Amino acid sequence: MTPSTPRTTTAPHPRGRRRPRGAGRVPAALLLPALLGLAFLVLPLLGLLVRAPWSALPQLLTEPEVWQALKLSLLSATLATGVALVLGVPLAWLLARTEFPGRRLVRALVTLPLVLPPVVGGVALLLVLGRNGILGRWLDSWTGITLPFTTTGVVLAEAFVAMPFLVISVEGALRAADPRYEEAAATLGASRLTAFRRVTLPLVAPGIGAGAVLAWARALGEFGATITFAGNFPGRTQTMPLAVYLAMESDPEAAIALSLVLLTVSVAVLAGLRDRWMSAP
Amino acid sequence: MRSVRRLLAASAVLALAAGLTACSGSGGGSTSNNPAPARPEVKGTVTVFAAASLKESFTELGKRFEAAYPGTTVTFNFGGSSALAQNIVSGAPADVFAAASPATMKTVTDAKLTGGDPTVFVRNTLEIAVAKGNPKNITGLKDLKGVKTALCAKEVPCGAAAVTALGAAGVELTPVTYEQDVKGAMTKVELGEVDASLVYQTDVKADSAKIEGVNFPEAAQAVNDYPVATLAKAPNANGAAAFLGYIGSADARRVFTDAGFQAP
């Protein structure tokens, strides 16, 4: 896990003192693309800051539509993460701890939304859960509930896209966790469910946390599936990314202001996670 | 283990770099093919940015144009007029822009990016699109209050026209969604996700197998003028001029009339 072990003062280990590992300079063939890559990732964000209409910002950001969109985004991303946790952790456990025929296929299917263009996910959701959809039709005729164009629809679209991130993260944590703890719990008379609750869950809690944050961030940025499945209505289904996109059509300054808000939220999340990720070796 | 990882990372970087150069290569290639300076003949690709409501008629026009000018290819970018205008202002390489409202064209003329003054070539009127057979018995704008309705976002021309028409009718309507272009509003009716949407007569006509149109008197107060112009930075200026000329031809006029557009 930690190759950069605490510095030992005893042995004159080659890695002991100097931080730059390995001998010699950093070769230009690596340094140049590395710096280019860094610039490629950072420059657009700097551009956002440079072009931001700072003087008009207070006025732009206090408009009720902005808060409406931000509130909706935070709420729906959090609910989607909740859905992902409730369904995704057991799914990850199933994939990591049990053997059943077709497990590899199931695993591939679970990760499919990860690589699927979100807008395709939106179309698929609409065809299944829409008012005329395969399941949505029954839902509508039995309960009168229709999911498209509702905040529930936004949550579903976001959960569909974000849950695989959580499942993969938790499954990885489960595989890394020593199953002998669970076996020990079983020999002491714990049922499999109790062992999961009392032993496994605390063991992989950091993995669940990381997965939840990943899923939350993915849900917050969700655009394609949301606009396709849930449409676009301020306060109900217009999340921040949708607001940014539509503002870009008529009022680029407002779009920049909205983007700044999302950037700030993202930086805040990253800062909150700095112990986990930014200090990683 | 570690070296394997490094190898993987390095190959990922290489793959990305290759992808990037491939992208820029193809982009550069297509633009360098286009300009045919000094030659009066019309050749190469003509890129037309057009309002979503022009999709059917312009696609047809494109085919006829290619037949009339051998060696040309017309590529279209159909979308919400405001998004297209914004793309052009941001430097999207286009030869001709046809918008569904003077307001969206103004974004481009204000940026001094049109080749000449825009001319209005057709007009279009709103209609209520409902499912075939009109199951909800919608007869006018007032009936939209009780059903699920999709409107265009007010940023795009069909949405602006809808606001005008609803205002003229004195109907306050809360739709379930504001779509980014008129085709989005159409699709939602077609899929049965909404009961009605306010679209153009031409859209209803183009989809008459599944959709039925309901006329309403207030539409007369929200008729949209469609301006078209060549663009100042057109990569294929000759092609742009030829396409603009073709839009004014009697041949094109027939296509527009068949599609349900009115003459300006």
Image (tube, coloured by chain):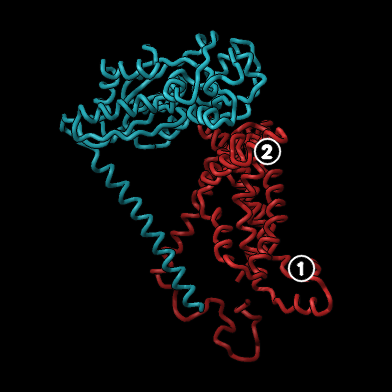
Name the residue located 39 percent from the left edge and 25 percent from the top edge.
Answer: B54
Q: Which residue is mark 1?
A: A196
Place of residue A199 in the rendered image (x, y in percent of width and height, measured from the top left): 78, 71
Q: Is residue A132 left or right of residue B111?
A: right
Residue at the extreme bottom of the image, as rendered: A11
Place of residue B260 in the rendered image (x, y in percent of width and height, measured from the top left): 40, 16
Q: Give above or below for B172 relative to B58.
A: above
Q: Is residue B234 left or right of residue B5?
A: left
Name the residue located 55 percent from the left edge and 27 percent from the top edge.
Answer: B153
Q: Which residue is mark 2?
A: A139
Q: Are marks 1 and 2 in contact (CB under 8 Å)?
A: no
Q: Amino acid at mark 2?
A: Leu
Name the residue located 81 percent from the left edge and 68 percent from the top edge.
Answer: A194
Tell me if I can see residue B190 in this picture: yes
The chain coloured red in the image:
A
Report in which chain the residue with disc 1 lies. Answer: A
Quarter of the rendering containing residue A212: bottom right
Q: Give the spatial CA distance, label 1 vs label 2.
A: 34 Å
Q: Bin the neighbour count of mark 2 within 10 Å (Cα to Cα): few under 14, some 14-19, many 20 and up.
A: some
Q: Earlier in the sequence, mark 1 or mark 2?
A: 2
Q: Secondary structure at mark 1?
A: helix
Report in which chain the residue with disc 2 lies. Answer: A
The chain coloured cyan in the image:
B
Q: Give above or below for B102 relative to B177.
A: above
